[in-house]
Image (tube, rainbow, N blue to C red):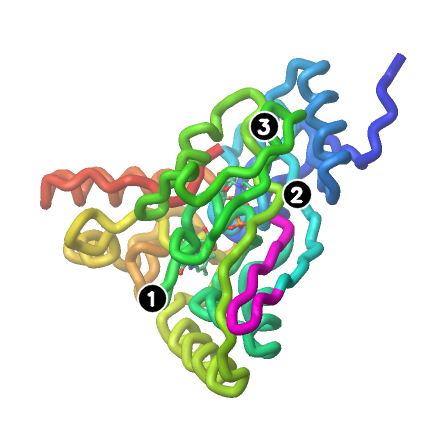
Amino acid sequence: MPVALPVTLYPDEPMARHSSWRAGGTVRYYAEPATPDEAIALAAWAREQQLPLIWIGRGTNLLVHDKGFDGVIAAYRGQRWELIEHGETAEVWIEAGAPMAGTARRLAAMGWAGLEWAEGLPGAVGGAIVGNAGCYGGSVAEVLIAADLLLNGSECVEWSVHDLAYTYRESVLKQLLHADIPPLVLAGRFRLQRGDPAALTARMKAIAAERKQKTPAGSSCGSVFKNPAGDFAGRLIEAAGLKGVRIGDAEISTLHANYIINHGQARAADILALIDLARTKVAEQFGITLQLEVRII
Ligand SMILES: Cc1cc2nc3c(=O)[nH]c(=O)nc-3n(C[C@H](O)[C@H](O)[C@H](O)COP(=O)(O)OP(=O)(O)OC[C@H]3O[C@@H](n4cnc5c(N)ncnc54)[C@H](O)[C@@H]3O)c2cc1C
Protein backbone atom coordinates (compact mmCIF):
# COMPACT_ATOMS: atom_id res chain seq x y z
CA MET A 1 0.00 0.00 0.00
CA PRO A 2 1.45 3.46 -0.86
CA VAL A 3 2.47 5.57 2.14
CA ALA A 4 0.31 8.68 2.62
CA LEU A 5 2.91 11.43 2.97
CA PRO A 6 2.12 14.57 4.97
CA VAL A 7 4.25 16.58 2.52
CA THR A 8 3.67 17.20 -1.19
CA LEU A 9 6.13 15.62 -3.64
CA TYR A 10 6.85 17.52 -6.85
CA PRO A 11 8.11 15.08 -9.52
CA ASP A 12 10.73 16.15 -12.09
CA GLU A 13 11.13 19.58 -10.52
CA PRO A 14 13.57 21.91 -12.34
CA MET A 15 16.18 22.82 -9.74
CA ALA A 16 16.93 26.07 -11.59
CA ARG A 17 13.84 27.31 -9.71
CA HIS A 18 15.54 26.57 -6.40
CA SER A 19 19.10 27.77 -7.04
CA SER A 20 20.01 31.45 -7.02
CA TRP A 21 22.15 30.66 -10.10
CA ARG A 22 18.85 29.99 -11.90
CA ALA A 23 20.48 27.04 -13.65
CA GLY A 24 20.67 23.27 -13.27
CA GLY A 25 18.81 20.05 -14.05
CA THR A 26 15.73 18.41 -12.57
CA VAL A 27 15.32 16.32 -9.45
CA ARG A 28 13.17 13.17 -9.41
CA TYR A 29 11.21 14.45 -6.39
CA TYR A 30 11.27 17.85 -4.69
CA ALA A 31 9.55 18.61 -1.37
CA GLU A 32 9.30 21.35 1.26
CA PRO A 33 8.75 19.82 4.70
CA ALA A 34 8.00 22.46 7.33
CA THR A 35 8.01 20.46 10.57
CA PRO A 36 10.26 17.75 12.04
CA ASP A 37 7.41 15.21 11.64
CA GLU A 38 7.11 16.01 7.93
CA ALA A 39 10.88 15.67 7.50
CA ILE A 40 10.88 12.33 9.36
CA ALA A 41 8.04 11.00 7.18
CA LEU A 42 9.82 12.14 4.02
CA ALA A 43 13.12 10.55 5.07
CA ALA A 44 11.31 7.26 5.85
CA TRP A 45 9.67 7.34 2.43
CA ALA A 46 12.97 8.07 0.64
CA ARG A 47 14.58 5.17 2.51
CA GLU A 48 11.72 2.86 1.55
CA GLN A 49 12.03 3.90 -2.11
CA GLN A 50 15.83 3.49 -1.88
CA LEU A 51 16.28 7.04 -3.13
CA PRO A 52 19.14 9.26 -1.92
CA LEU A 53 17.98 12.39 -0.10
CA ILE A 54 19.52 15.85 0.03
CA TRP A 55 18.37 18.58 2.42
CA ILE A 56 18.73 22.14 1.19
CA GLY A 57 17.78 25.64 2.30
CA ARG A 58 17.26 28.50 -0.16
CA GLY A 59 19.69 27.22 -2.80
CA THR A 60 22.01 30.23 -2.66
CA ASN A 61 25.12 28.05 -2.48
CA LEU A 62 24.44 25.08 -4.75
CA LEU A 63 24.13 23.91 -8.33
CA VAL A 64 22.53 20.73 -9.71
CA HIS A 65 24.17 19.18 -12.81
CA ASP A 66 22.18 19.51 -16.05
CA LYS A 67 21.71 15.72 -16.03
CA GLY A 68 19.70 16.14 -12.81
CA PHE A 69 19.57 14.23 -9.53
CA ASP A 70 17.86 10.84 -9.32
CA GLY A 71 16.63 11.13 -5.76
CA VAL A 72 14.82 13.51 -3.42
CA ILE A 73 15.79 17.12 -2.70
CA ALA A 74 13.96 18.68 0.22
CA ALA A 75 14.09 22.30 1.35
CA TYR A 76 13.26 22.58 5.05
CA ARG A 77 10.81 25.44 5.52
CA GLY A 78 10.14 25.61 9.30
CA GLN A 79 10.50 29.28 10.27
CA ARG A 80 9.39 29.57 13.91
CA TRP A 81 11.59 31.36 16.40
CA GLU A 82 11.64 32.01 20.11
CA LEU A 83 13.57 34.53 22.21
CA ILE A 84 14.61 33.69 25.75
CA GLU A 85 15.83 36.78 27.62
CA HIS A 86 18.26 36.76 30.55
CA GLY A 87 18.55 40.48 31.40
CA GLU A 88 21.30 41.92 29.22
CA THR A 89 21.74 38.74 27.17
CA ALA A 90 19.38 36.42 25.35
CA GLU A 91 19.23 33.20 23.38
CA VAL A 92 17.23 33.00 20.19
CA TRP A 93 16.09 29.65 18.84
CA ILE A 94 15.44 29.89 15.10
CA GLU A 95 14.17 27.17 12.78
CA ALA A 96 16.41 26.32 9.84
CA GLY A 97 14.05 27.61 7.14
CA ALA A 98 13.99 31.18 8.45
CA PRO A 99 15.86 33.75 6.34
CA MET A 100 19.18 34.60 7.96
CA ALA A 101 19.26 38.30 7.03
CA GLY A 102 15.58 39.01 7.70
CA THR A 103 15.77 37.40 11.13
CA ALA A 104 18.93 39.37 11.98
CA ARG A 105 17.19 42.60 10.95
CA ARG A 106 14.14 41.84 13.06
CA LEU A 107 16.26 41.09 16.14
CA ALA A 108 18.33 44.26 15.66
CA ALA A 109 15.16 46.35 15.47
CA MET A 110 14.16 44.81 18.83
CA GLY A 111 17.54 45.85 20.29
CA TRP A 112 19.31 42.47 20.17
CA ALA A 113 22.88 42.40 18.85
CA GLY A 114 24.82 39.38 17.60
CA LEU A 115 23.59 38.65 14.08
CA GLU A 116 23.83 42.08 12.45
CA TRP A 117 26.83 40.98 10.34
CA ALA A 118 24.36 38.77 8.44
CA GLU A 119 22.57 41.74 6.84
CA GLY A 120 22.20 40.93 3.15
CA LEU A 121 23.44 37.34 3.54
CA PRO A 122 21.24 35.32 1.18
CA GLY A 123 19.83 31.98 2.30
CA ALA A 124 18.30 30.39 5.36
CA VAL A 125 19.53 29.68 8.87
CA GLY A 126 20.13 25.96 8.18
CA GLY A 127 22.39 26.61 5.20
CA ALA A 128 24.35 29.17 7.22
CA ILE A 129 24.82 26.66 10.05
CA VAL A 130 26.05 23.91 7.69
CA GLY A 131 28.55 26.13 5.87
CA ASN A 132 29.60 28.39 8.78
CA ALA A 133 28.49 31.40 6.74
CA GLY A 134 30.27 34.61 7.59
CA CYS A 135 30.82 38.18 6.47
CA TYR A 136 31.43 41.70 7.76
CA GLY A 137 33.34 40.60 10.85
CA GLY A 138 31.01 37.84 12.00
CA SER A 139 30.31 34.18 11.40
CA VAL A 140 27.93 31.48 12.60
CA ALA A 141 30.67 29.78 14.61
CA GLU A 142 31.07 32.86 16.81
CA VAL A 143 27.41 33.18 17.87
CA LEU A 144 25.90 29.72 17.63
CA ILE A 145 25.35 27.89 20.92
CA ALA A 146 23.93 24.66 19.52
CA ALA A 147 21.99 23.18 16.60
CA ASP A 148 18.98 20.85 16.61
CA LEU A 149 19.61 18.04 14.13
CA LEU A 150 17.64 15.17 12.67
CA LEU A 151 20.05 12.24 12.30
CA ASN A 152 19.39 9.26 10.00
CA GLY A 153 16.01 10.82 9.25
CA SER A 154 14.64 9.70 12.60
CA GLU A 155 16.61 10.83 15.67
CA CYS A 156 16.33 14.43 16.98
CA VAL A 157 19.49 15.49 18.83
CA GLU A 158 21.20 18.71 19.88
CA TRP A 159 24.84 19.26 18.94
CA SER A 160 26.84 22.03 20.60
CA VAL A 161 28.89 24.45 18.54
CA HIS A 162 31.99 22.47 19.63
CA ASP A 163 30.48 19.26 18.23
CA LEU A 164 30.11 20.99 14.87
CA ALA A 165 33.92 21.54 14.74
CA TYR A 166 33.75 24.75 12.74
CA THR A 167 36.60 26.13 10.67
CA TYR A 168 36.48 28.61 7.75
CA ARG A 169 33.30 27.68 5.74
CA GLU A 170 33.56 24.12 7.08
CA SER A 171 31.78 21.98 9.66
CA VAL A 172 31.37 18.34 10.58
CA LEU A 173 27.95 18.55 8.91
CA LYS A 174 29.58 19.29 5.56
CA GLN A 175 31.55 16.04 5.87
CA LEU A 176 28.29 14.11 6.38
CA LEU A 177 26.35 15.58 3.44
CA HIS A 178 26.89 12.58 1.21
CA ALA A 179 25.23 9.97 3.43
CA ASP A 180 22.07 8.41 1.90
CA ILE A 181 20.07 10.19 4.62
CA PRO A 182 22.31 13.09 5.70
CA PRO A 183 21.78 15.11 8.90
CA LEU A 184 19.06 17.77 8.66
CA VAL A 185 19.57 21.01 10.56
CA LEU A 186 16.19 21.72 12.14
CA ALA A 187 17.10 24.85 14.12
CA GLY A 188 19.90 26.83 15.74
CA ARG A 189 20.25 28.51 19.12
CA PHE A 190 22.24 31.77 18.98
CA ARG A 191 23.72 34.05 21.67
CA LEU A 192 22.63 37.72 21.71
CA GLN A 193 23.39 40.82 23.77
CA ARG A 194 21.29 43.88 24.35
CA GLY A 195 22.20 46.76 22.04
CA ASP A 196 20.86 50.09 20.91
CA PRO A 197 18.28 49.45 18.15
CA ALA A 198 19.14 52.69 16.34
CA ALA A 199 22.90 51.92 16.35
CA LEU A 200 22.30 48.33 15.23
CA THR A 201 20.00 49.44 12.44
CA ALA A 202 22.55 52.04 11.32
CA ARG A 203 25.32 49.39 11.29
CA MET A 204 23.13 47.10 9.18
CA LYS A 205 22.28 49.89 6.76
CA ALA A 206 26.02 50.52 6.30
CA ILE A 207 26.61 46.80 5.65
CA ALA A 208 23.71 46.73 3.16
CA ALA A 209 25.15 49.72 1.29
CA GLU A 210 28.65 48.17 1.15
CA ARG A 211 27.22 44.85 -0.04
CA LYS A 212 25.25 46.57 -2.78
CA GLN A 213 28.40 48.27 -4.02
CA LYS A 214 30.58 45.12 -3.92
CA THR A 215 28.12 42.46 -5.11
CA PRO A 216 27.92 41.88 -8.86
CA ALA A 217 24.40 42.26 -10.24
CA GLY A 218 22.68 39.20 -11.72
CA SER A 219 22.05 35.58 -10.80
CA SER A 220 24.90 33.98 -8.86
CA CYS A 221 25.69 31.80 -5.87
CA GLY A 222 28.05 34.30 -4.25
CA SER A 223 31.69 33.30 -3.95
CA VAL A 224 32.37 30.14 -5.95
CA PHE A 225 35.65 29.22 -4.23
CA LYS A 226 36.89 29.47 -0.67
CA ASN A 227 39.75 31.90 -0.13
CA PRO A 228 43.05 30.01 0.14
CA ALA A 229 45.08 30.76 3.28
CA GLY A 230 46.55 34.27 3.12
CA ASP A 231 45.02 35.15 -0.25
CA PHE A 232 41.73 35.75 -2.05
CA ALA A 233 40.28 33.46 -4.72
CA GLY A 234 38.93 36.51 -6.56
CA ARG A 235 42.37 38.14 -6.68
CA LEU A 236 43.96 34.96 -8.07
CA ILE A 237 41.26 34.46 -10.73
CA GLU A 238 41.57 38.10 -11.77
CA ALA A 239 45.39 37.83 -11.88
CA ALA A 240 45.00 34.77 -14.12
CA GLY A 241 43.28 37.11 -16.59
CA LEU A 242 39.85 35.53 -16.35
CA LYS A 243 37.63 38.49 -15.44
CA GLY A 244 34.86 38.79 -18.01
CA VAL A 245 35.52 35.37 -19.63
CA ARG A 246 32.23 33.99 -20.86
CA ILE A 247 31.00 30.50 -21.75
CA GLY A 248 27.45 30.42 -23.05
CA ASP A 249 25.45 32.75 -20.84
CA ALA A 250 27.78 32.32 -17.85
CA GLU A 251 30.48 34.90 -17.12
CA ILE A 252 33.26 35.36 -14.58
CA SER A 253 32.17 38.68 -13.12
CA THR A 254 34.00 41.79 -14.23
CA LEU A 255 33.36 43.30 -10.77
CA HIS A 256 34.39 40.37 -8.53
CA ALA A 257 36.21 37.46 -10.18
CA ASN A 258 35.09 34.90 -7.55
CA TYR A 259 31.49 35.33 -8.78
CA ILE A 260 30.08 33.60 -11.87
CA ILE A 261 27.02 35.35 -13.25
CA ASN A 262 24.24 33.70 -15.21
CA HIS A 263 23.10 36.26 -17.76
CA GLY A 264 19.86 34.38 -18.37
CA GLN A 265 20.15 31.05 -20.18
CA ALA A 266 23.35 29.55 -18.72
CA ARG A 267 23.37 25.79 -18.27
CA ALA A 268 25.03 24.17 -15.29
CA ALA A 269 27.64 22.89 -17.79
CA ASP A 270 28.59 26.49 -18.72
CA ILE A 271 29.09 27.40 -15.06
CA LEU A 272 31.03 24.18 -14.41
CA ALA A 273 33.26 24.86 -17.44
CA LEU A 274 34.15 28.29 -16.00
CA ILE A 275 34.82 26.68 -12.60
CA ASP A 276 37.20 24.20 -14.26
CA LEU A 277 38.89 26.96 -16.22
CA ALA A 278 39.46 29.11 -13.11
CA ARG A 279 40.82 26.14 -11.19
CA THR A 280 43.14 25.07 -14.00
CA LYS A 281 44.54 28.54 -14.74
CA VAL A 282 45.06 29.43 -11.07
CA ALA A 283 46.80 26.08 -10.45
CA GLU A 284 49.02 26.53 -13.54
CA GLN A 285 50.00 30.11 -12.79
CA PHE A 286 50.17 30.17 -8.98
CA GLY A 287 50.40 26.52 -7.92
CA ILE A 288 47.26 26.91 -5.77
CA THR A 289 44.34 24.47 -5.97
CA LEU A 290 41.13 26.37 -5.36
CA GLN A 291 38.52 24.59 -3.22
CA LEU A 292 34.82 25.00 -3.97
CA GLU A 293 32.65 26.90 -1.52
CA VAL A 294 29.47 26.09 -3.48
CA ARG A 295 28.05 22.58 -3.55
CA ILE A 296 27.70 20.75 -6.87
CA ILE A 297 24.96 18.08 -6.84
C1 LIG B 1 24.90 37.23 -3.80
C2 LIG B 1 25.39 36.24 -2.77
C3 LIG B 1 26.23 36.69 -1.75
C4 LIG B 1 26.70 35.79 -0.77
N1 LIG B 1 27.49 36.26 0.23
C5 LIG B 1 27.93 35.41 1.18
C6 LIG B 1 28.74 35.89 2.26
O1 LIG B 1 29.04 37.06 2.38
N2 LIG B 1 29.18 34.97 3.18
C7 LIG B 1 28.85 33.65 3.10
O2 LIG B 1 29.27 32.87 3.97
N3 LIG B 1 28.08 33.16 2.09
C8 LIG B 1 27.61 34.01 1.14
N4 LIG B 1 26.83 33.54 0.12
C9 LIG B 1 26.54 32.10 0.03
C10 LIG B 1 25.22 31.70 0.72
O3 LIG B 1 24.41 32.81 0.93
C11 LIG B 1 25.47 31.05 2.08
O4 LIG B 1 26.30 29.93 1.91
C12 LIG B 1 24.17 30.61 2.74
O5 LIG B 1 24.40 30.38 4.11
C13 LIG B 1 23.54 29.38 2.11
O6 LIG B 1 22.25 29.20 2.66
P1 LIG B 1 21.10 28.44 1.85
O7 LIG B 1 19.92 28.31 2.75
O8 LIG B 1 20.84 29.06 0.55
O9 LIG B 1 21.79 27.02 1.65
P2 LIG B 1 21.73 26.06 0.35
O10 LIG B 1 22.44 26.72 -0.78
O11 LIG B 1 20.33 25.64 0.12
O12 LIG B 1 22.59 24.84 0.87
C14 LIG B 1 23.97 24.99 1.14
C15 LIG B 1 24.49 23.66 1.72
O13 LIG B 1 23.91 23.42 2.99
C16 LIG B 1 23.10 22.23 2.97
N5 LIG B 1 21.87 22.59 3.72
C17 LIG B 1 21.12 23.71 3.60
N6 LIG B 1 20.14 23.73 4.51
C18 LIG B 1 20.27 22.58 5.24
C19 LIG B 1 19.58 22.04 6.35
N7 LIG B 1 18.54 22.67 6.92
N8 LIG B 1 19.99 20.86 6.86
C20 LIG B 1 21.06 20.21 6.31
N9 LIG B 1 21.76 20.67 5.24
C21 LIG B 1 21.37 21.85 4.72
C22 LIG B 1 22.86 21.91 1.50
O14 LIG B 1 22.72 20.53 1.28
C23 LIG B 1 24.13 22.46 0.85
O15 LIG B 1 25.18 21.51 0.98
C24 LIG B 1 26.32 34.43 -0.85
C25 LIG B 1 25.45 34.00 -1.87
C26 LIG B 1 24.99 34.90 -2.81
C27 LIG B 1 24.04 34.42 -3.87
At 31% across and 48% down in the image, what residue appears? 168
Please report the bounds of the magenta region as a residue range. 85-96
Neighbourhood count class around disc 1 (C-alpha, 10 Å): few under 14, some 14–19, many 20 upward: few
Q: CA distance from mark 3 to mark 2?
A: 14 Å
Q: Residue 220, image x and y in percent?
A: 46, 55
Q: CA distance from mark 1 to mark 2?
A: 28 Å
Quickly name the residue at label 3: 151
Residue 279's quadrant in the figure? top left
Question: In the rendered structure, which amino acid carries the disc numbered 2?
Answer: Tyr
| Circle nearer the N terminus (3, 1) | 1
Looking at the image, residue 290 sits to the left or right of residue 114; the answer is: left
Residue 6 is a magenta residue: no
Question: In the rendered structure, which amino acid carries the disc numbered 1?
Answer: Gly
Q: Residue 22, image x and y in percent?
A: 55, 50
User: Which mark is drawn over residue 137?
Assistant: 1
Q: Nearer the viewer, mark 1 or mark 2?
A: 1
Q: Nearer the viewer, residue 225 or 162?
A: 162
User: Which mark is drawn over residue 227?
Assistant: none
Q: Assess mark 2: CB under 8 A from ligand 1? A: yes
| Circle nearer the N terminus (3, 2) | 2
